[in-house]
Amino acid sequence: MNKILITLCFATLNFFAQAQSLIAKFSYSSNCLHNPSYFSDSSVSKNGTINYWSWNFGDGNTKCCGIQNPSHIYHSLGTFPVTLVVKNLSGDTDTIINDLVVHDFPKTNFILTSVGDSIKFTDQTTSIDPLKSWYWRFNHGTPDSSISKIPPLILFSGSPASNKCSLITTSIYGCSDTLNYLVSWSVKENNQVNLISIFPNPVTGSLSLNTDGSKINVKVVDLNGRVLRENAIQTKNFELDVSDLSEGIYFLQLQMDKIIQTTKFIKE
């Protein structure tokens, strides 16, 4: 009986010694939707060189059998069990399964508002995951860059065709999105952004709105911020009837694409 127990114990110890002679390990980086995820094998073999790697990425795709450090693109969000099987020249085998969470990238967006002769940029990025960084670039702008979510007012000095800006937002998981935009507008003598000209001001009946023909959304707003009426216009000349408004101060809020301009008018 003792001889049998000794033999069993020896066999058990020998089995675990063989199992530990090959340990499957891997790590990954960049797990963003529609972008390559990079897998790095770090398996350890104490009994012969590893000569076999079999990957299962958990989404129905596999890579076999000689690729040690593959990459893979996931096209759906979620958690995927990634399996690595390794073998060495001695015939030892080991398997490891690690979960990989695929994250969405931000949807970068911003709007522009005229403030005197400068432009105010307001971030409107949406993201499932928290953002960790914002990087703004302003071609022909002063300043020409910012790493703040809320950049300072920007004064552009170039022609409308060259005043380009961009924003790169990055989530805490390293997923990034970029938005490029050309800041083009008509300019007054004092260099203020001017989407539209209005007259007469003060007004008693109708405001005459003159534009360059671009599609502009026009809102009439009172001092309490209430939107009294809203029109979408795409004509160079438009008559806006304000005869029913009480006497006082009002604002026209104008938006063309990402540019917002607010103009004050007086109703008599």
Image (cartoon, grey):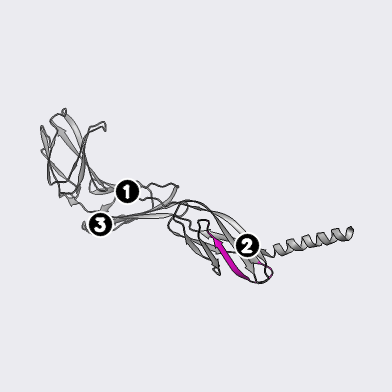
Mark 2 lies on residue: 24
SS at badge 2: loop
Q: Nearer the viewer, residue 117 or 103?
A: 103
Lateral position of residue 30 relative to residue 242, left or right: right
Mark 3 / mark 2, whichever is N-terminal: 2
Q: How far apart are marks 2 and 1 (CA)?
A: 46 Å
Report the residue at 32% width, 48% height from top.
Answer: 110
Magenta residues, start to end: 45-58
For residue 64: magenta? no
For residue 51: magenta? yes
Lateral position of residue 81 relative to residue 260, left or right: right
* Residue 152 in view here: no
Q: Nearer the viewer, residue 61 or 222?
A: 61
Query: Which disc, if any, is residue 22?
Result: none
The answer to whether 83 is drawn above or below residue 67 in the figure is above
Q: Nearer the viewer, residue 93 or 235?
A: 93
SS at badge 3: loop
**Residue 242, image x and y in percent?**
14, 33
Query: Which disc, if any, is residue 163?
Result: 3
* Residue 87 in view here: yes
Q: How far apart are marks 1 and 3 (CA)?
A: 16 Å
**Residue 147, image x and y in percent?**
38, 53
Q: What residue type is labelled 3?
A: Asn
SS at badge 1: strand
Q: Distance between the residues labelled 3 and 2?
A: 53 Å
Mark 1 lies on residue: 110
